[in-house]
Structure formats: structure tokens, C-alpha cells
Image (cartoon, rainbow, N blue to C red):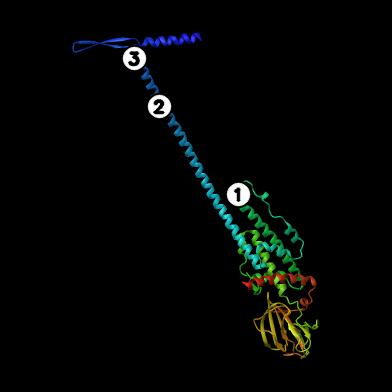
Amino acid sequence: MSSKTTGLRQWRQRFTALFQDHEIFVRTHGHVRFLRVSAVWQKRVALIAGLVLLVWAGTMLTVLVNQFLTAGERAEVAQKQVAAAAAEQRIAQYRDRVGEVAADLEQRQEQLEEWSKIHFGVEPAAVTDEVGAQPAAGTEAKAAKAPLKTSAMIDPNLPPEAQILARLEAQQESFATRLLTAVNARAANAEGAVAKLGMDPTALVRNAAAGRGGPFIPYRGRMGHARALGKSFAALESALFRMEVLERTLVALPSGKPADVLMLSSSYGYRSDPFTGAGAMHAGLDFPGPIGTPILAAAPGKVVYVGQKSGYGNVVEVDHGQGIMTRYAHLSGFTSRVGAQVTAGEQIAKMGSTGRSTGSHLHFEVRLNGVAVNPRRFLEAKADVLEVKADARERVGSVAAVRSAR
Ligand SMILES: [Zn+2]
């Protein structure tokens, strides 16, 4: 403490020694004056000068520091701008991708809605219930119960927007898969039934795809449209086409009796002609019965011919689609007109004995793409086939109802 005090005192002594009273002689125009500059006054001047210097130095320092700070800040702002630009670009790219994905999803949704209406006459939400209503053929039930892809399978690092799209896509994909399984099951059932009726399902589908399938395929010629929407959609499209061809063929096949009388089940094929006795091909089945017995359409379809034909006498022909036609001959009268839509079992004519006929009977023919086939296998269809057929008719009928309601 004492040494500090002595040090201070020494400094003070030195400072005081700097300022001593001065007397200055000034000689002006022969007069001598003398000015006295006191030590106190000198000290005051020195102090003021020192203060001014201090303030100046302080100001300069502040300016310099401010300049440094601004430069730093400017660098920071520039850095922020670069980062913002990069982020903006990233967001723009991301937005583009999201837009693309959303457009894809929308197109697929439209396709699914179109298919749902064309093939099931309902909105997509109702389709899998509708399709699944059929007694399950193994895989169908399993697929229908398969859970939707959950959000757990979606990358949690994706932005929320992208997660919504990913979830939608997963749901769509899952729906398409379930629909595909169900449609394949229906097609397989129809294929089995068609084969049991003695028809070649593969040839039926091939012919239909070649555009020879008859007038009922609603979107013939548009095959391959879904290929652009991805593999699962292309698979779904061909499965739907296959189901459509086979089920419509099944519905078109005449399994209803054309008259409520006994048929001569042995009458189809080669036999001796009742008029000439020579061997001749008999292309239909005969149903003997009283004149005027109601003649019924054997399957739903459109009346395409009402009139006379050589040998057949009075004839009605009904087109059932899928290249299938039925012919009813030797009639005594007509109860339908060309162009009329008829249901299975609806009366179209009356039994008779016109044309080359030896007595009152119905001559009944079934033609597939113009070639006569034995109707017996259709008329004697077993219950399992008829069940599949009834299910097919229900679907095709509901679609037809939706289309005619538009
Ligand atoms: Zn005959």
C-alpha cells in the first residue's frame, strides 16, 4: 500500500515538474511587456488537450469497430442469401416432383374409377366388396383380407406433403392388387364353367382381343391404354378384359330351355333325313310339342331376324353377343320384332310345323361365330356352372343397367 502511494506521489511530482510558472517577455514597438503563464493554467490546457485526444481516439475506434462488424454482417447476409437460393431451388425441384407424382396418382385414380364403372357399375370404393361377394376361390379371400400398406412403411424422413402422396400411392397400389386378385378369381371361375360347357376359353379370349368378340365388350380396341400407368395397371387391364370376355360368353351361352317340352336329346348330328332317308347333318335339337307352345329365348340377347328361311320355315334368330347366336325354326307365329332386347325365358314365338317339318316341333340351333354347335351341353349345364353363370349375369346386368341409365 505504501509503495503504491509513493509511486503515485513520484508520478505526481514528475507531472508537476513539467508545469512550472513561466514568465515570458514580449517586446512590441519598443514596449516591453511580460506575460505570466502559470503552472495551473498550463495543467488545464494540457488536460483539455488530453481529453480531446481521448474523445477523438475513442470515436475513431468506434468507427473502426463498426466497420469490422458491418463487414462480418455483410458476409453473413451473403451466406444466408446463397443458402436461401439453394433451398428455393431444392423446394422448386421437390414441388415439381410432387406435382408429377400427384398427376400420376390422379390419372391412375381416373382409370380405376373408369374401370369400376365399366366393369362393376360402381365407384372404386365399392368394387372390392362387389367383387368379393362371389364365393371365394382360395386366393381371393386371402387377398381381400390383406391389410393396406400402413404409414409405417413410408419413409418418415419425407416431407409431410410427400408422405401423403406416398400413402395415397400405397393405397392405390394395394387396391389395384386386391382388385387384380379378385378379378383373376372371377375369370378363373368363368373359365372353368366355360370349359365345362365344352368351349375353349383361351380361344375365346384370343378371338375377342382380335376384335371378333361380339358387340358387348365395352372397351374393345382400347387395350394397352393402361400400360403407361405401370405394370400392375397393365396386368389389371388384361385381367379385366379376360374376365369380361369369359363372363359375357358364359352369360350369352343359352342354358335356358327354348320350350317347356322334352327335347330329343339324340337328334343332334348325322342322321337319316326324314324326307329323303339319306345321311344328313342335323345341326340342332328338336323339341316336339303342341302347335302354339311358347318358344322362349334361351339366353338374353337381341332379336336379329324374324321371318322365313328356306327349309326352316318361320324363323327367329337372337344374337347373344360374344359371337353366339340361337335360331328357332318351324314356328307357327312370332311374338317379337327385330331389334327387341329379350331376357332369358322371354317368349319370342310359337311352336309350329312350317318349312321342312314332319310335325309340330321346335328346331333349335346354337351357332358360335357362325358354326353350329351341339346345344345339349349348354342346356344340361350342371348346378356349379349355373351358379357361376348367375353370378356373372348379375355383374354384367348391373353394368348394363348403369350404362342404359346414363
Ligand atoms: Zn330339327
Q: Report, in whole angstroms, how far the alpha carbon at label 1 lies from the one at label 3.
A: 80 Å
Badge 1 amino acid: Pro
Compared to residue 391, the image places residue 314 above or below, namely below
Residue identifier under label 1: 160
Residue identifier under label 3: 41
Badge 2 amino acid: Thr
Badge 3 amino acid: Trp
Say how many tags the image has: 3
Q: Position of residue 39 (x, y in %)?
A: 34, 11
Compared to residue 64, the image places residue 213 above or below, namely below
Residue under the point 54% across and 50% down: 93
Between 250 and 76, the one lying in front of the other is 76
Dot in front, 1 or 3: 3
Q: Secondary structure at mark 1?
A: helix
Residue identifier under label 2: 59
Residue 213 in the figure: left or right of residue 360: left
Dot in front, 2 or 3: 3
Q: Report, in whole angstroms, how far the alpha carbon at label 2 lies from the one at label 3.
A: 27 Å
> In terms of sequence position, does the residue under pointer 2 or pointer 1 come before the other?
2
Q: Secondary structure at mark 2?
A: helix
Tag of residue 123: none
Between 174 and 280, the one lying in front of the other is 174
